[in-house]
Each structure stands twice: as C-alpha cells, then as structure tokens.
Image (cartoon, rainbow, N blue to C red):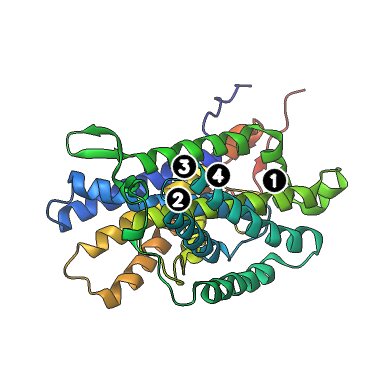
Amino acid sequence: MSTPAPVWIRPERIKELSLVGVIAVVVVIFGFLVDDYYSGQFFNRITTSVVITAVLAVAQTMVVVTRNIDLSVGSIVGVSAYLTGQYAAAHPDASPVLAIGLALGIGALLGAVNGLLVAYARVPAIIVTLGTLAIYRSWLVSHAEARTITADSLPSWVVDLPTRTVVSVGSLDVRAVFFVVIVIVALLAVGMQRLRWGRRLYAIGSNPEAAAQAGLPTRRLVFGAFVACGALSGLAGFLFLARFGTITVVAGQGLELDSVAAAVVGGVSVLGGSGTLVGALLGAVLIDVLDQSLVRVPQVSEFWRNAILGALILAAVIADVAIGRRFRRRWSAEARPHTRVTEDEPADQAPALEASDA
C-alpha cells in the first residue's frame, strides 16, 4: 500500500491564499479601468486608510471565534477618539505613550462591561452589544455637548502621525501606523495559534459545552476576549483621531459593520471556532482596496458604489468558500490513506472504503 504524500497546507492557509489571489485579481481589473492606478500615491492611501478597519477586524475576530459578536466597537472607537482628543488637546506636552495608553484603557474598560454581561450574566452577546452600542454613543453625545475636537487643537505629533514613514522605496512609503498594525497582528496571530489561551478560545467557539466539561475557564476566557476586543477598539479610536483630526459625536459610526464584514470576508466563521487573524487582516485589505478603487472609477456614481461594493464582497466570499471547500476535500482525502475519492463521485457522498490487506 502506497504512502500518501504529506499535506503541507492547512485549510486556514488555503483561505488566506485564496484571499490573496482575489485581491490580486481586483488590483489587475482596476488597473485596466483606472488611469495611473499603480501609483505610489494610491498605495500610500490604502496603507493609511486600512489600519483602522484592520485593527477592528482583528478585535472582532477574537470575539467571534468564541461564538460571540461585538457590535459596540464603533461606539467604543468614538468614545476613545473623543476622550483621547480632549486629553491631548488639554495636555499638548504629555507623552504620546500616555495618550495611547488612555485610549487602550478606555476601550478595555468598555469592553469589560460587555464581557461581564456576556460571560457572567449570561446575556446573549448580540443583545448586550446592541444595547451598549446605543448607551456608549448616547453618553458621548451627552458628554460632548455639541463640541468638536479640531485638528488645530491637537499636538503636532498626533496630526503628523499618519504621514510618518518607516521606509520608502521610490514613491512607495510604508507608513509607521501600517507597520505597527502589521506587527500587532503578527504577534496576536502567533498567540492565537501557538499559546494556550488562544487555542482555548477556539475550543470554546467549537463546542462551548465540551470546553466547560473539560474544565476550561470559559467565563474568564470569554471575558478576556471582550476586554481585548475593547482595548483594540480603543487603539482604533486613537488611530481614528490621528487620521482625521476633527472628531465629532458620530466618530466611528458604522465601523462595527465594517469590522464584521472584514472578519467574515477573511474566513472567520460566525458560528465560532474557525478563522485566523491574518485572514481578517486580508479581508480588511480587500474591502479597503475595493472601496478606494471604486471611488476612482468615474462611471460609478455614489448611489451605486455601495451596491457594487457589496456585490463584489459577496462574490469574493463565494469564491473563497468554493476554493477552500475544494482544497479541504482533497486535503481530507489525502489525510485518510484508506479513502479514495474519484472524480466522478462527489466527496460529500459516502466514499468507497477499501479494506486494508491484513
């Protein structure tokens, strides 16, 4: 009996590779439609704008893998951006570390409220976060009293942060904020895949009852996931402040939907237990590339842009699922040496099992 060839690519990596392929196809298509599309200016715009959605997609993924969801991330971004802007405007000589720490702390505190209600009070996450979405936003409206944080009131280091460059290659600039976000995603991805707490989050999402029976501290882990999601949302709030400068009470509104969309496009299952942070990052990149590219197509009106964007995202998800399912089917067949799947027989049907030679 012949030994099957080893399988080197896991299904999660197949999803990520298929997303890279979809992004490449989108870039090629728009390269024919838009003049001067492959310019350094467009690359710099993408790497600057994608960081907020990328951080929120990663934050959302950490909650979704536990079979929960956080719809309050947009409001947390708004509260964190506004309060951090107030602090920076009132203390222009303060250390940037303090401002960033304040944003992280505010986000973590608001995420802890969500985590307490979901993990310990046993209230469904969608109900809790829909409520806190409105509560946090309403508190911000009351606190702001129609006042606006303006860019001219902020220290120069905040306003100049989005344009700071780590390295330049010709007209292509790798922005500091983009580099930092990539490092954060890489570290969290390693933690989710290699460390015990990350694997436990996946175990909770795969089967919460079995995880509890196995003795895992499910409540504490779910609570920690919401705190981490809130802290990352606070960081996104600081990035929102640095990018736009002018902050009103509607700051961050709608970002909760972008974060969910990026995570789902990136292959994160809303049923929990499946998905990677790298996939969520690629989902955010795909959505941002589509959004920024459609703006540059003069034939597409503002009225139809969101509809086309939604259709393209849906097509990307279908293609990702189809490609991933085909490769996973082959991977499963190769992993079982006594299973033979022929081209004429669908793998979903009962495969022919051959008895081994005893």
The amino acid type, in three-letter code, at marker 1 is: Leu
Is residue 263 shown to the viewer in this render?
yes
What is the residue that sits farthest to the left in this orientation?
35
The amino acid type, in three-letter code, at marker 4 is: Thr
Which is nearer the N-term, disc 3 or disc 1?
3
Provide residue 189's location: percent of width, then percent of height.
Answer: 55, 38
Foreground: disc 1 or disc 2: 2
- Element type at marker 2? helix
Distance from the alpha carbon under mark 3 to that under mark 4: 34 Å
The residue to which callout 2 is attached is: 54
Query: Residue 189 has which mark?
Result: none
Distance from the alpha carbon under mark 3 to that under mark 2: 25 Å
Provide residue 35's location: percent of width, then percent of height.
Answer: 12, 55
Distance from the alpha carbon under mark 1 to that under mark 2: 20 Å
The amino acid type, in three-letter code, at marker 3 is: Ser
The residue to which callout 1 is attached is: 201
Foreground: disc 2 or disc 4: 2
Which is nearer the N-term, disc 2 or disc 4?
2
The residue to which callout 3 is attached is: 95
The residue to which callout 4 is attached is: 276
